[in-house]
Every structure is written in C-alpha cells, then in structure tokens.
Image (cartoon, rainbow, N blue to C red):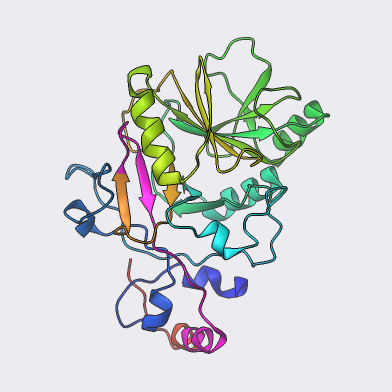
C-alpha cells in the first residue's frame, strides 16, 4: 500500500478510480462547500478565498502502527469516531522534505494524529503562524534541540523573550516549541505533546465550545492563560487555546482536520476565523480494489486536481 501512495495522491476525478476506492479517500475540499450544509456553527470559506482543488490522500499508516503512548491509531473505532480531531494539515513547498522532517522530529509519536502535507507554491509569510506544534524535549532536552537542529530546524525569535522552552522553526519556517521537563501539561518525554491555537481573549469561550464539539475532546483544563483540551485525561497530545492571537492576514499554513460521519467534506472557518478541514471517513481499499487501481495508474489514466 505505502509503495503506491505517491501515485494515489491524485485523484478525485470521476471515472479514474473505482467508486469503492473513491469512498475511501480524504476529500480535502469542494467548491460546493460554500453553499453546502456543513457543521452548523462552522462558516464556509468566503468567496474571496480560493477553494483548494479537490484531491485525495489515503492513510499511510497500518492498523498496527505505533502511535506512541496513546497508540490510538491502532484501532479504527477509536481514531475514526463520530466526529473527531484526526490530524493537522500543513502547507509545504517541498512535501517530501517536510514529511521526512516531521516524521523524524516527532519520532512517529503523534498521539494517533496524522500530519498531512499538501503542496503550495508560496513560501511562508514573515508573520507568526496562528497554529503551531509543541514537542517534548525529554530529560536530555538540550540534546533533543541539537538533534532537531541537525534535522534542519532553526532557532527563531518571535519576541518570546527569556522563556523555559526553545522556539524553533521547521525547514520552511513554521514555528514550533520544544518543551523542557516539568513544563505544565506535558505527559510524555518525546514526540508531539501539544497543538497550540491562538485564540483572542474575547473568543475563548466560543472557541472552547466549538472545538470541544468538533474535536470530540472533552477533558478540559482551565487556566488563567487559556484552556487545554484532551481526548482523554491521559492522552499525551493536547489542544491548547489562548491569547495572544496573531493577526489573521492570510490563510493559515497549519490547519486542524476533523473526520465526522455526517458533514460535507471541505474547508471551513471556526468561530475565530481559522480554516479547518472536514474529511470523509476513510475506508482502506481491499486487495482486489488496489489491483484495479494500480492497473489504471499503470495504463496512464490521468487524475485531475
């Protein structure tokens, strides 16, 4: 399966894939979502925002994949629940390089979340991202920072001052943090431990209610700096929301992805104006379908974006 995934990242043109395979793809958007019946509290993209082209990406993990201490990729009934945060979509100039960097950076420990990279032609703008990832530095955090720098990360200054964590950027400039031992809320020694979404103080309650519902993460911690959501109290990855919120000047380069059973696939805005993806519930094709797909690709059938 993994060997033909690059060839399969192309595909929602009717007739180019068996209907049964199309039902298993993650459809990232359709222009029709601007007028479709989506999540009641979510807003479709405004007409001024170009809708991304329809495409599909098949999950590349196996049911036995190790998802870290959560290991929530191992059971489809857990990951693909009735409305759940299932991943992060990241724009990338070089998809292969970024995928390799984040696989190595997280060491495959993502709490069951899928990091999905989509090609884009424009480099990251100079402003800080509204969504960033936090990694655990572990007991030997200095060595971990050095390892990440060797992988291609760089140190960046976003005005953080003297803080007890390290602020780095991935090879395309997306900020992320490496947290040191004893940092509040860190429940693992390595890998992804937090997804941090900028939320203005006045939007805190609305965003909390919105993402509790859409992510289906209901273990809540309230703090004076913001809120933290977890799938379960012991889940190693949390969704952290709080101020300050970076100005919204362009489409977010990192976006959350949810997989419900009853929404139209597409791209929507949350209550704070941040884009997020709704993908259809995937079903991996069986062996016979994969053979048919490989034959179609081998015969030169084109898939349109």
Q: Tell me residue 84's x, y (percent).
A: 46, 51
**Res. 1 image quadrant:** bottom right
**Magenta-colored stretch includes residue 42:** no
Q: Position of residue 179 (x, y in %)?
A: 68, 26
Work out whether residue 211 or residue 154 is closer to the camera in this orientation and state it. Answer: 211
Residue 206 image offset from top left, x and y in percent:
33, 29
Q: Quadrant of residue 199?
A: top left
Q: Residue furthest top?
A: 162
Q: Is residue 75 left or right of residue 126?
A: right
Residue 92 appears in view: no
- Which residue: 19% across, 42% down? 46
Q: Is residue 69 visible?
A: yes
- Report the side of 181 relative to 224 (left or right): right
Q: Nearer the viewer, residue 181 or 221?
A: 221
Q: Residue at x 63, y 54 (%)?
A: 72
- Toward which corner of the image does residue 281 lie, by quadrant? bottom left
Which residue is painted at 52% across and 74% down in the image? 284
Residue 9: image location, x then y, percent: 46, 67
* Highlighted range, magenta: 269-294
Membership of 286 in magenta stretch: yes
Image-based side of 232 in relation to 23, left or right = right
Q: The C terminus lies in which quarter of the figure?
A: bottom left
Total number of numbered discs in the rendering: 0
């Amino acid at each position: 399966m993994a060997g033909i995934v690059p060839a399969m990242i192309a595909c929602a043109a009717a007739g180019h894939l068996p209907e049964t395979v199309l039902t298993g793809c993650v459809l990232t958007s359709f222009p029709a979502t601007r007028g479709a019946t989506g999540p009641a509290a979510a807003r479709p993209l405004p007409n001024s925002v170009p809708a991304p082209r329809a495409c599909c990406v098949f999950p590349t993990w196996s049911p036995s994949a190790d998802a870290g201490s959560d290991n929530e990729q191992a059971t489809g009934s857990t990951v693909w629940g009735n409305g759940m945060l299932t991943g992060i979509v990241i724009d990338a100039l070089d998809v292969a390089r970024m995928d390799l960097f984040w696989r190595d950076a997280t060491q495959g420990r993502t709490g069951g979340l899928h990091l999905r990279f989509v090609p884009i032609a424009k480099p990251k703008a100079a402003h800080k991202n509204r969504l960033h990832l936090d990694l655990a530095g572990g007991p030997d955090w200095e060595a971990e920072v050095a390892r990440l720098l060797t992988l291609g990360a760089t140190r960046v200054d976003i005005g953080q001052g003297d803080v007890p964590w390290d602020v780095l950027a991935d090879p395309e400039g997306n900020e992320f943090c490496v947290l040191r031992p004893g940092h509040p809320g860190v429940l693992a020694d390595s890998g992804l431990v937090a997804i941090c979404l900028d939320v203005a103080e006045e939007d805190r309650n609305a965003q909390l209610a919105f993402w509790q519902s859409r992510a289906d993460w209901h273990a809540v911690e309230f703090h004076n700096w913001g809120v933290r959501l977890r799938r379960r109290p012991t889940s190693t990855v949390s969704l952290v929301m709080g101020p300050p919120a970076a100005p919204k000047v362009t489409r977010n380069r990192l976006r959350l992805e949810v997989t419900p059973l009853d929404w139209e696939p597409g791209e929507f805005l949350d209550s704070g104006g941040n884009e997020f993806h709704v993908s259809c519930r995937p079903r991996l094709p069986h062996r016979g379908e994969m053979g048919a797909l490989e034959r179609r690709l081998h015969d030169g059938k084109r898939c349109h974006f």
